[in-house]
Image (spheres, rainbow, N blue to C red):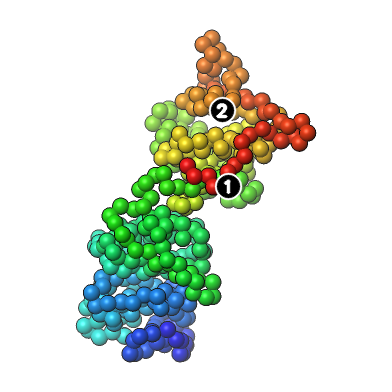
Amino acid sequence: MTLETVKEINTEYEYKLKTAGLDRDLVIKSAEGIFSPRRADKGTEAMLRECRFEETDNVLDLGCGAGIVGMTAAICGAKVTMCDIDPTAVRYSSLNVSNNLSPAESARISLFVSDAFDNINEKGFTKILSNPPYHTDFSVARRFIEGAFTHLCVGGTLYMVTKRLEWYKNKLTSVFGGVKVKEAGDGYYVFCAEKRGGTPYNANKSHSLVKFRPVPEGADPSGALDFVLNVFQKSLAHTWTEEGINTFTNLIEHARILPVFRYFEAYDDIRGKTVGILAADSTLSHLSLLFVDAAYRSRGIGKRLVEMLERETSSIGLSVNAEPSAFPFYLKIGFHPVNTGPDGSGVIDEKDGIRSVKLYKKLKRDKNKGQVFTPAASADDRT
């Protein structure tokens, strides 16, 4: 694709480009707010160089912007669906289709406003192409990849281009079972993943790579707190009183505003998602929150998070006000009830609707190095 001219028309932009393999120039109109308004994005150009469209193709241009990908596919004879979350982008795509394509070519195109696949009911696409936003978190890209697998036919191919390598490579491998990656210059990578069967590769829950890391001090805690609140609502809220739920929810909202916690995260590097969060007080002497995704429990993740806290703290011990159902877990990893009670199971306290058992763990340290005795984390922690 080669850029020839560009000019600004009031708040709009217009540029001429030539797509490799086509017999014509395309005149593209765009505007501020649409992705890459002044020229064809280099990543999109790189992706189109790797993809060849056939007349038998059924193509989805996911996040179509001004419509370059979809128009190229339609000119090659493919049936095309174009969608974007931005109505303005869809409007300009429609305008560009009308201005550049013949009636027969235009008739092969359908346009939708859609947040990812929300309004895309058709399945069985042979090719899906996308240049997802990569300056944000991976939530959008995750929806694109997982949705693409569902909407492709067996043997269909997802093409993506981005400047982020490792996460996309791991995520595409986890869903499709493999991916081809080509370095395209200017920092771009083009990914090509073929759907080989009806079940995502990561349906096998044993295929995961869980890593553990402290969250840097001062980092935005919203992601960690959203995870905690989500797990709480799914796993515990139904057993709590309304007062307790309100107290807990207020605690989470308070933590969004004030830096009351230090966070430790368990992260599935294959699927690209948080699977466990531990939050401790600012002195790292009190364990305040510990939540693990239900699908990842009984796999040692909670224990490993506590071990991370033990290695980080300079305190002689750790305290926790444990939810009664978590009491056996804390006993298993070396905590003891502060008040054992008559049956040894700990005394349950209740405050503001929250029931808890106070526990404490004295930390054993190397007298020479001052380090806690805990198992070392493995470099490749497959769970």
Q: Which residue is mark 1?
A: 379
Q: Amino acid at mark 1?
A: Ala
Q: What's the residue at 49%, 48% (across, down)?
A: 209
Would residue 298 be seen by someone viewing this image from the given angle?
yes
Q: How many numbered circles are shown?
A: 2
Q: Position of residue 357 (x, y in %)?
A: 54, 22
Find numbered disc 2 in the image and state the secondary structure of the residue it sits on.
Answer: loop
Q: Which residue is mark 2?
A: 333
Quarter residue 75 falls in = bottom left
Q: Position of residue 165 (x, y in %)?
A: 51, 63
Find numbered disc 1 in the image and state the secondary structure of the residue it sits on.
Answer: loop
Q: What's the residue at 33%, 66% (across, down)?
A: 157
Q: What's the residue at 61%, 36% (across, down)?
A: 375
- Against 33, residue 354 (above or below) is above
Q: Is residue 172 toward the left or the right of residue 155 in the image? A: right
- Against 349, residue 109 (above or below) is below
Would residue 253 be seen by someone viewing this image from the given angle?
no
Q: Earlier in the sequence, mark 1 or mark 2?
A: 2
Q: Is residue 365 toward the left or the right of residue 87 in the image? A: right
